[in-house]
Amino acid sequence: MHWQTTRYIVDLTRPRVMGIVNVTPDSFSDGGRLGAEAIRHCERLVAEGADLLDIGGESTRPGSKAVSVDEELGRVLPVLDAALTLGVPVSIDTTKAEVMRAVLGRGADIVNDINALQTAGTLDAVAAHPNCGVCLMHMRGEPATMQERPLYGDVVTEVREFLDGRLQALQARGIAPERVVVDPGIGFGKSVEHNLELLRRQRDLLALGRPLLVGWSRKSTLGAITGRDVSQRLPASLAAALAAVHGGARVLRVHDVAATVDALKVWAAARG
């Protein structure tokens, strides 16, 4: 089990930790890091044990507004250039074809798209690259409106069918399966109960045949369960992360890298 990316083949025989680097002023829990501060954050996450970095220049929190291509690139490119020297795969979290082409041209390893390469030109941008990794995420609606009464018949079945359709679309464009992981999109157009049902039945998604990348870190569902503010959700985030790994997740997208790395070490030791 592995993930092909631009510069690296990521071994997924053990769970990997992807550190979040939000180069935005308005992300839901850790916005405000720009320029040199964001670069220092990348360095700190790698020192804490991050296996991958995920850099985003546009907030996708519920109710967020889109930014222009130029603004997003202005935030992301300096941080990307520095991160590429740190010895780990670097992912760019974007939905824009222009941004994808620019970052892949600079050497980015992975495109992480919450819209699963459905936006015009995005599939072309990735298909034109010989090796870059891809993360396809499920989202109902768009960030500005996605939490307005999301409805499903069977959320797990609908997420699985959507992701299967996107995998087929990529395969039809010649994108090798080894380049692709999938993300159920916890918190993206889903209620608390939808998110929990995806966690309970997460193994159903393994039928897709691709590794699962999961992001529970500091999510509002954890606040709904615990009553904790976003700044106090580390224990809940670790519990959700380990539950996701138990359910077959291979990549954890997290804010708190050091704590997650330690939790995974204990989990692995307990399993022998």
Image (cartoon, rainbow, N blue to C red):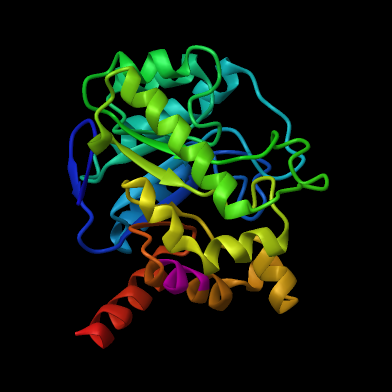
Residue positioned 31% across, 29% down in the render:
108
Residue 213 x %, y % = 41, 51
Pick the residue in front: 86 or 132: 132
Q: Is residue 97 above or below residue 34?
A: above
- Along the horizontal axis of the image, is 226 left or right of 246? right
Q: Is residue 175 above or below residue 179?
A: above
Which region shows up in magenta?
A: 240-244
- Along the horizontal axis of the image, is 87 left or right of 104? left
Q: Is residue 241 magenta?
A: yes
Q: Is residue 162 magenta?
A: no
Residue positioned 50% across, 22% down in the render:
73
Can residue 3 be seen here?
yes
Residue 116 x %, y % = 50, 31
- Along the horizontal axis of the image, is 94 left or right of 190? left
Q: For the image shown, how many numbered marks are present on the structure?
A: 0
Residue 99 x %, y % = 47, 19
Residue positioned 32% across, 46% down in the render:
210
- The answer to which quarter of the image holds residue 266 is bottom left
Residue 235 x %, y % = 55, 78
Can residue 137 be seen here?
no
Residue positioned 69% across, 33% down in the render:
142
In the image, farthest residue toward the right = 149
Main SS of residues in magenta:
helix
The image quadrant where one finds the C terminus is bottom left
Q: Is residue 242 above or below residue 51?
A: below
